[in-house]
């Protein structure tokens, strides 16, 4: 290849990289004017958060499917066989096709469009307010402030996103029922409308209590520890920005998994349950589910599938936070 051609390719590659990593406002005055409009600036954290969450969900949906099936395996029995993630994956494929691992993707995307949009949007909004107040008072932001912002953002977002979360669990657990008892939901909209029609609108918020607590625990672990870890890595290491983000995401993913898995387990059980022949539900609520599972299946059952859960949470956290960071740079 001739030197002029190599130089041209290098210049083009460099220019493309600069365009992709520079804020849009620097590439286009019109875009800059739009992005700096007060309404747009308010909405961007929510939009970026939703897009980041949807990208992450698309990547890890099969892992989430396996996680849900692991949590529902051996329900009500302490001595039940303990399936491995690989065995569950093989069973899902054997009963249908590889595409079945993506069952409930439409519900997962809707959940992210609602839940993650609100979660990251609220967190960014809260942190901006906290930073402004801290700068006015000549103070610095600590772990306590980050944790409070993460807990509040997670709780508020979870209430808004519960119907989509419920639809996701129903769609993913439907394949466990005998064929003649399956609902065979066609999409998230079909699932939501049929649940509301058959069980009442209030049923869309089934499992809301553990969902909110799970979200608060998840956000406490994910957002607070991510923010804190990134701050510490930046101050005490010479790692590149990308490595700092990946490392902080992995750390945040572990703590998010540890704090939230028991509540995620209970949420899955409550959202999957349906009335028996006697017209009663297996569990009367979050506390009743914790009590019955502890008694019938053992307390360690709440942490069944921790590895799978972490493999789901950590990459999801990494992809979400990295994409959110990248979108944040592009939309400055």
Image (cartoon, rainbow, N blue to C red):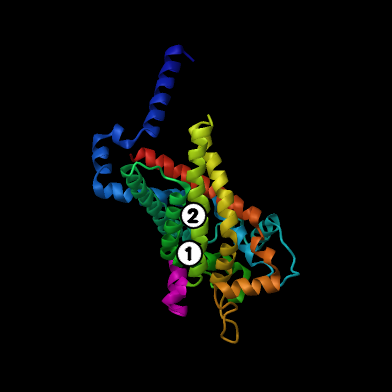
Residue 131 sits inside the magenta stretch: no
Name the image quarter holding residue 259.
bottom right
Q: Is residue 104 above or below residue 12?
A: below
- Report crowding for label 2: few under 14, some 14 to 19, many 20 or more residues within 10 A (C-alpha): many
Residue placed at 47% from the left, 59% from the top? 106
Q: Position of residue 83 (x, y in %)?
A: 71, 61
> Which residues lie in the magenta part?
186-205
Q: Could you say whether the residue bearing mark 2 is in a helix, strand or loop?
A: helix
Q: Position of residue 70 (x, y in %)?
A: 65, 62
- Of residues 286 and 139, which is closer to you in this image? 139
* Residue topped by disc 1: 212
- Of residues 4 and 67, which is closer to you in this image? 67
In screen coordinates, is 116 left or right of 29?
right
- Work out whether mark 2 precedes mark 1 in sequence or the reverse, and give the earlier one: 1
Residue placed at 53% from the left, 52% from the top? 221
Q: Is residue 181 above or below residue 325?
A: below
- Of residues 292 and 160, which is closer to you in this image? 292
* Residue topped by disc 2: 219
Q: Residue furthest bottom?
A: 278
């Amino acid at each position: 290849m001739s030197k002029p051609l190599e130089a041209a390719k290098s210049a083009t590659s460099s220019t493309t990289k600069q365009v992709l990593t520079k804020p849009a406002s620097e590439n286009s005055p019109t875009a800059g004017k739009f992005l700096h409009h007060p309404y747009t600036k308010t909405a961007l954290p929510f939009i970026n958060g939703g897009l980041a969450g949807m990208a992450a969900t698309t990547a890890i949906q099969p892992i989430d499917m396996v996680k849900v099936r692991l949590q529902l395996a051996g329900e009500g029995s302490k001595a039940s066989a303990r399936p491995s993630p690989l065995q569950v994956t093989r069973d899902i494929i054997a009963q249908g096709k590889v595409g079945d691992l993506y069952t409930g993707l439409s519900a997962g995307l809707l959940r992210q469009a609602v839940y993650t949009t609100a979660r990251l949007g609220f967190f960014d909004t809260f942190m901006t307010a906290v930073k402004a107040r801290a700068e006015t008072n000549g103070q610095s932001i600590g772990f306590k402030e980050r944790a409070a912002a993460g807990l509040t953002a997670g709780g508020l977002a979870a209430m808004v996103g519960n119907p989509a979360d419920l639809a996701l669990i129903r769609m993913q657990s439907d394949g466990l029922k005998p064929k003649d008892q399956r609902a065979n939901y066609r999409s998230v909209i079909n699932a939501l409308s049929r649940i509301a029609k058959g069980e009442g609108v209030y049923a869309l918020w089934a499992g809301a209590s553990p969902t909110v607590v799970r979200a608060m625990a998840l956000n406490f672990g994910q957002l607070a520890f991510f923010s804190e870890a990134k701050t510490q890595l930046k101050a005490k290491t010479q790692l590149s920005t990308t490595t700092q983000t990946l490392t902080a995401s992995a750390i945040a993913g572990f703590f998010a998994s540890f704090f939230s898995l028991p509540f995620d387990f209970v949420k899955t059980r409550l959202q999957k349950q349906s009335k028996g022949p006697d017209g009663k539900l297996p569990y009367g609520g979050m506390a009743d589910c914790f009590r019955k599972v502890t008694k019938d299946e053992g307390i360690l059952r709440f942490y069944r599938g921790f590895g799978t859960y972490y493999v789901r949470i950590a990459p999801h956290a990494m992809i979400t936070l990295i994409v959110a960071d990248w979108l944040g740079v592009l939309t400055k």
